[in-house]
Amino acid sequence: MTKTHRTDGGIDDPNDRESGGDGPGEDGPGEDGPEGDEPRGDGPGTGDPSDDGTPEEISREEADELIQEIERRRSLRGAAAVAVAVIGIAFSVFQLFLAARSFTFTVWLPTVKIAGISLSPWQISLQLLQANAIHVAFALVLTFLLFPVSTGDGFVAQALGRVAPAASRRLGEANPVTRLLERGRAGLRWAFLDPDRDRVTPADLVFIVAAFLSAFYFLTEFAEIQNMRVFGVDSGRPVTEVYAFLQPLLGGIPFVSEYSYAMILGVTGVLLVLEATRRTLGLPLMIIVATFIVYARWGYLISSGTPFLGLLAIPELTWPDIVQNLWYNTENGVFGIPVTVSVSFIYIFILFGSFLEMSGAGQWFIDLAYALTGGRKGGPAKASILASGFMGTISGSSIANTVTTGAFTIPLMKRSGYSPEFSGAVEASASSGGQILPPVMGAAAFLMVQYTATPFADIIIIATIPAIVFFFGVWVMVHLKAVEAGIGGVSDADTVDLWNHLKRGWFYLVPIVLLLYYLIIERLSVSRSAWFTLVALVGLVALVSAYSEEARLRLLAVFAAIVGVELASHAVAGVNVVGLVTGAGGAGLPPVEAATALLAGIEWYAMLAGVITLLSKPDLDASLLDLNPSVRDTAETVGDRTGRELEDSQPFKLATFVVTSMEQGARTAVPVVVAVAAAGIIPGVISVSGLGPNLTSLLLALSGGSIVIMLLVTAVSSIILGMGMPTTVTYIILISMLATPLVEFGIPLLAAHLFILYFGVIADITPPVAVAAYAASGVAKSDPFETGVKAFSLSLNKAIVPFAFVLAPGIVLLREKPNAAELPLRERYRVIGFEDLAELSYAIPEIIVPVVGVFLGVIALGATVIGTLYARVGRTGRAAFALSSLLLMAPGLLSESVFDTLGLVGVTVSVNALLLDLTLRGIGLALFAALTVRNRRKAEREDDEGDGPSTESESSEIAAGVGSA
């Protein structure tokens, strides 16, 4: 299937070029009647290519360029590219040491003597602040290498660029002032501008040096930093005392001796984070973060007597106080909780995803999705949903997921009869769901672990049902669209046989299963689970890369020999072979204990067996392993430059796989690390200024005690703030401001955090700044805004489900504790267990009924959005289906709105909340059933008359929501 996708040269369906850009079968806002109801698609997979010769596919290189264009990255070559690779690999190696050994580890150096100096094993012990500082410094250095200062198209660059030409017109080209301005302009362009995004500027080098000095200070002067926690940042030494050789140069400058070196580095560090934020995430976020810093300094000027705004008044803070709290603190600020989570959890999972993708798992999962659904009705769109869900396990980035998966899925959707806009919308909608789909989810999920003090296994449990509901909802909509337009599946040439595909790549599922085992069964920490899974993945790839028909017996013999020697070592000396050789052996272990100790390191033995086999036969053909094209390209590039045929050497390809995965992992992590570093400033300011309680009081006052208003304010704030920004940033900012007010309303803590996360994800597909949808439109060659509108429509259930689970916590498997009234608000709910499910008096009304209602509600929502169930649905029918969807999914939203309205006129209503919830869901079910029966009868009449778009068999499929799946 992979080769077919890359070479079929398909072109757009002529039906996709009709005016208005509507999808197949869209005939207006749900009008019934014979006219306009005929689908415009060509039937099951029979779209004819147009005559314009425009290729439908985009190549991998074009996909990479599209991602770089959206993310504004450089495309470096030569020494700069090598520097990025070396620093990225070093970043990943540093994080792997932390994951394996925590903050104390040993770097093994050979014990030799050079000029009387002995090199021996070097033990490193880092404090949390030091590890966080190194983590951020790596990200800053890579940011300044990968992202340009300016490409010359910003308003500042353009304004400065007009000064010299204006002087030339007024004063003449020969005027000294004009020549001086021209030289200044040329100097600025040389120092700052990178219009082609292909070179590192002098300004970047200055920023890199400053970032290095900051990290170096944390490593070498940590005792001084500890003293500053007591005596303040001003107690630090000036730079001329820290570096005595600078005394002759800077000793006479008053500014240098007036401020401590720590203060200068702190200010510089915060400014570097702001600049990195501007480059990677855009000017708006930088302005927001900078505004909070300014507020920390001058917020005391707000009068406490001012209505409402007086709640924002804070005590006066000096710049040294602010810098100390924002730069030399692990509780708040740049190195606060978000960066700590990045160090401990986020990076290692990004690295795991990178290794999985470079191993070829990404393409294998896409092919698996097509094997499962490609031949069914609407198969390409359904395969897109599955593939995006699979890729969400690998990539937490909506943009990367959209472009990577969409490069294969969108062209096939277009050829089968879906419009370009609808095809791009399906991909963008499904790809945005990768951040909410367990087990990996996005970076925000790991932040939720830290902010709520909840095990990641519990986060997986509460997030599972809402995520399934979301993907089920998109699935239903694309199925209804396929039935409406008569769209079938793809041809056999575009799919692979499922059984053969599983036999060839079953090992790609092993890391996912292992990860779930470590997290849920063994209940290991997130970082340890990711580390063990990553090691197992590399061992598995090494083993598979050494497997072939001719070498399998050799591989088995090597593996058996290694396992036998290790087992004997444990049985005789109680340690592994390395311990035995170094003299660490002791009493032997009984056979069972020796086998248990052996199994603990089985992935390392697999890795060693694979490497030894490859070294003994480097030219073998690894028939089962198809590494990512990036790995093959890197191997070929190195081979070309060294004049050797390295691309055919399996040991070299395995080594290239490892280093390429580490480099790509670092590249992927850079925007995430910068995002959490910048966003950490905001809760830092809120904490140091004491704004938190006042902000909670302000929001509660503005909401007027209405939970509906509070939820709507949170939802709208998440969408607006999340436009064009990473979900991680949106989550950090909003939970620091809005999570507490939501909990004050009695919403479970985990449900409140998940609510904010969901709406932060929705921002990626919400016009006008729908970054995932615009990425999809670049692949689909469609109208960006219309693609965004359709993507938002397809994801409407993602906007309703959060209201459903905050008002009915059973949907996310949360239950109020028996002694909740005696506990703090944050601790009143717990994740349910099997004993709760066995308690039918609780499970049926509070879990099963709401969950079933949500699933039925998304079917009703699909009929509302698409305008088809068994037959076309008119405007009145759509409105009725929408009401039934709301009653089935979130009846509490409707009832609370009514109660709030009655409260405005002084009417107080007291009802049994559970009974009311069940009653409203029952009404919604009755309405949905009546509408469904009516629509079914209409379809039967149309079928008898030969006018309907659906056959009876198709109607049966829709009745199940995913019938043809």
Image (cartoon, grey):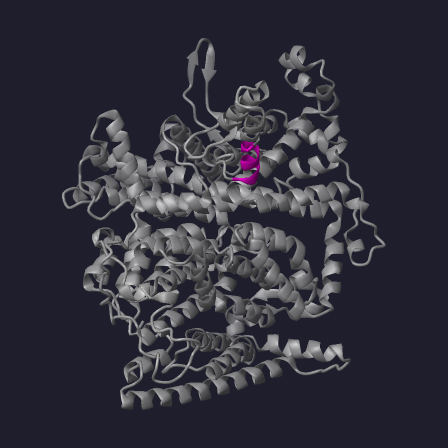
Q: Quadrant of the N terminus?
A: bottom left
Residue occupying image coordinates x 72% and y 58%: 696
Q: Quadrant of residue 322?
A: top right
Looking at the image, the residue that sits furthest to the top is 115
Q: How many callouts does the rendering have? A: 0
Image coordinates for residue 363, horizontal then vertical, percent: 30, 52
Q: Is residue 318 left or right of residue 90?
A: right
- Considering the whole magenta stretch, tell me its main secondary structure: helix
Q: Percent from the top left, x then y, of residue 121?
A: 46, 24
Q: Residue furthest toward the right? A: 305
- Asked if residue 138 lies left or right of residue 249, the reply is left
In reply to whether residue 161 is colored magenta, the answer given is yes
User: Is residue 910 shown to the viewer in this render?
Assistant: yes
Residue 107 picture location, percent across and down: 46, 28
Question: Residue 132: x and y, percent?
Answer: 57, 37
Q: Residue at x 21, y 54 (%)?
A: 8
Q: Which residues are magenta?
A: 154-162
Judging depth in this view, the residue of 225 and 72 nearest the camera is: 72
Q: Which one is nearer the viewer's eye here, 636 or 236?
A: 636
Q: Which of the two residues, 960 or 767, is positioned nearer the viewer here?
A: 767
Give the quarter of the figure containing the C terminus: bottom left
Which of the 4 image quadrants contains residue 831? bottom right
Residue at image point 49% right, 49% down: 526
Q: Is residue 785 magenta?
A: no
| Residue 602 in sight | no
